[in-house]
Amino acid sequence: MTTTDDLIRLCPPPTGVPVVDWPAVEQSLGMPLPADYKQLADAYGPGSFCGFLHLYHPLAPTEWVDLTGPMPATIRRQLQHDHDTGTHAVPYDPRQLFAIGVTDNGEYLFWIQEPEHAPGQWDIAVNEARGPRWYTHKGGIADFLLAVLTGREQVPLFPRDLLDHGISFTASPAARSHPQPHQNQPSGRPVSTDEIRTWARANGYEVNDRGRIPATITDAWKQAHST
């Protein structure tokens, strides 16, 4: 039995999960991926744990939570800027950090890619939303999720009531059938409010699940996607 098997028993995955072409994904990224991540992605598909923790997935419905989308590179550039300017202390070489998830509060999850060519040995790091604090888990993403969802490990950056409403996985409403390279937002394409909310949370904005999205967030989204 693997850690992923233990997680599946604890938190049953949905049915009808889309199939990922892993050789194509790894070729697109230019790197091998940890086996436990691929097992998780195959079992659960795109979605969130406890309505809070979103793992990036190569078939995610929007590019902002897509493992092959623009966010990992964008976040790495932000970390490199923080590291170089001393804005926030970054405890790892930003070149060794690859973003693999985001919380509704804006914390990012990373693989620590050390050793570079041994993905089975990559640990997990969590960065505080809009802040300097970091948390490191010695183990892979499946072990991290199992530790958090069982309460065996409490991440100080996560809300204390994370498990109060039970352990669950919510699948994304739709998924693409194949990984797509990032492109600028085509002009004139209708954009859902869910897509803007996902982008806003991934970029550190606080936004409610329902109701009107503040104009400041909408304007920021438009500026980020202007051609």
Image: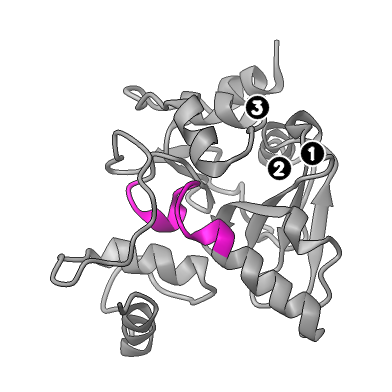
- Ranked by sequence position, the earlier of labels 1 and 3 is 3
Residue under numbered circle 2: 148
Image side of residue 110 versus residue 43, left or right: right
For the N terminus, the image quarter is top right
Q: Amino acid at mark 2?
A: Val
The residue drawn where x is 77% and y is 35% is 117
Mark closer to the observer (2, 3): 3
Residue 105 in view: no
Compared across the picture, whether 98 is left or right of 43 comes to right
Tag 3's secondary structure? helix
Q: Which residue is mark 1?
A: 152
Q: Residue at x 79, y 44 (%)?
A: 153
Which residue shows up at 15% across the image and 65% down it?
189
What is the C-alpha distance between the residues marked 2 and 1?
Answer: 6 Å
Image location of residue 107, percent across then percent down = 63, 63
| Label 2 close to label 1 by CB (< 8 Å) | yes
Residue on which the image places disc 3: 36
Q: Nearer the viewer, mark 1 or mark 3?
A: 3
Q: Secondary structure at mark 1?
A: loop
Q: CA distance from mark 1 to mark 3?
A: 19 Å
Residue 77 location in percent, x, y? 63, 70
Pointers 1 and 3 in contact (C-beta within 8 Å): no
Q: How is the image coloured?
A: one colour
User: Pointer 3: residues within 10 angstroms few (<14), some, or many (20+)?
Assistant: some
In the image shown, does 185 or 195 lie closer to the viewer? 185
- Residue in the foreground of this view, choosing between 51 and 135: 135
Q: Mark 2 or mark 3: which comes first in sequence?
A: 3
Residue range corresponding to the magenta coloring: 61-73
Location of residue 76 with respect to 120 vertically, above or below = below
Q: Is residue 127 above or below residue 26?
A: below
Instruction: Give percent across and percent down for residue 47.
Output: 43, 43
Q: Residues within 10 Å of mark 1 (few under 14, many from 20)?
A: few
